[in-house]
Image (tube, rainbow, N blue to C red):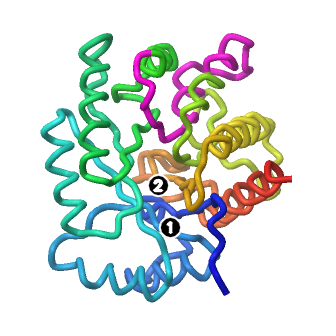
């Protein structure tokens, strides 16, 4: 039976999100990878393995039939070029998620840097998506919209939790919604996390009871529609469930070493996986 070439959603689990996970306590790397596959995720978003671990990771990903994307933290075009060379050498990387660590670079110099990174990505043949993230070149909504207007080829990893917490968006004004919808026109991948405007990562409830989830569902759905409207046969939309450990995760006993999370991140991660697939199914109807 031939595999469908229809554009598809690829729901990945963040390897960083496995850090300190109660459900994974005491499990080896191999067991954690199997745990991700058995839960129904399509892939893993992580980091290029160290040379001594390369063959192990290739074997694990192949045996569990998982896709693989990685994160990069460049400051310059040279940094990006070197990372792309390493990624190409490793092989099999679906895409690179880049947090460009130049939060105080703005206007034309920032546009030129992003343009250079995009050119390097296309030359290497490995997609690079720029993450919307605090403390990076996409620090806020306004400058990210400026980049969109200047660069027709800009492709973004959408993580709106950063804009919601940075802007204290307890409620979503018409101005904020318009800017967010503009950013969503360049959706190339997603990092899933929900903010309430005060904490960057909250527990939305076992069935998604938190009122902020409806906004994120609307945005994820809108971004999926935008991506799908331009997708070609065989294209893949990565949706990374990225619920981080403390200090992203809220804890009690702060002065005792953040040793108790108030949320079950593994159950929340699986909830977001199911949510992504439901939204994808709904936009296809």
Q: From the viewer's perspective, is 15 left or right of 185?
A: left
Tell me if mark 2 has few (under 14), some (14-19) or many (20+) residues whose alpha carbon lies within 10 angstroms of its own.
Answer: some
Magenta range: 150-179
Residue at image mark 2: 245
In the structure shown, which secondary structural element does the residue marked by tag 2 occupy? loop
Residue nearer the viewer, 102 or 253:
102
Residue at image mark 1: 21
In the structure shown, which secondary structural element does the residue marked by tag 1 occupy? loop
Q: Residue at x 79, y 38 (%)?
A: 214
Report x, y in % for residue 172.
Answer: 73, 20
Report x, y in % for residue 236.
Answer: 55, 58
- The vertical placement of 59 against 23, above or below, is below
**Is residue 170 magenta-colored?**
yes
Quarter the N terminus occupies: bottom right
- The vertical placement of 180 against 267, above or below, is above
Q: Residue at x 45, y 25 (%)?
A: 152
The answer to whether the residue labelled 1 contacts the one labelled 2, judged by CB atoms less than 8 Å apart, is yes
């Amino acid at each position: 039976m031939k595999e469908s070439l229809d554009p598809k959603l690829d729901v990945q689990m963040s390897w960083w999100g496995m850090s300190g996970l109660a459900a994974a306590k005491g499990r080896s790397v191999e067991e954690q990878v199997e745990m991700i596959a058995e839960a129904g995720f399509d892939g893993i978003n992580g980091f290029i393995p160290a040379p001594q671990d390369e063959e192990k990771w290739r074997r694990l990903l192949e045996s569990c039939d998982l896709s693989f994307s990685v994160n990069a933290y460049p400051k310059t075009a040279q940094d990006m070029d070197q990372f792309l060379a390493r990624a190409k050498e490793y092989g099999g990387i679906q895409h690179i998620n880049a947090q460009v660590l130049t939060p105080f670079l703005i206007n034309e110099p920032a546009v030129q840097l992003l343009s250079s990174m995009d050119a390097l990505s296309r030359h290497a043949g490995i997609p690079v998506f720029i993450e919307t993230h605090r403390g990076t070149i996409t620090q806020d909504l306004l400058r990210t919209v400026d980049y969109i207007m200047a660069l027709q080829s800009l492709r973004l990893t959408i993580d709106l939790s950063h804009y919601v917490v940075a802007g204290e968006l307890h409620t979503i004004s018409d101005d904020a919604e318009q800017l967010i919808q503009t950013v969503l026109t360049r959706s190339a991948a997603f990092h899933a996390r929900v903010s309430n405007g005060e904490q960057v990562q909250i527990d939305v409830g076992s069935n998604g009871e938190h009122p902020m989830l409806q906004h994120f569902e609307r945005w994820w759905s809108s971004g999926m529609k935008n991506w799908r409207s331009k997708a070609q046969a065989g294209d893949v939309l990565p949706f990374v469930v990225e619920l981080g450990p403390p200090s992203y995760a809220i804890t009690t006993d702060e002065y005792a070493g953040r040793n108790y999370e108030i949320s079950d991140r593994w159950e929340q991660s699986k909830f977001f996986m199911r949510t992504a697939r439901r939204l994808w199914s709904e936009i296809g109807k």
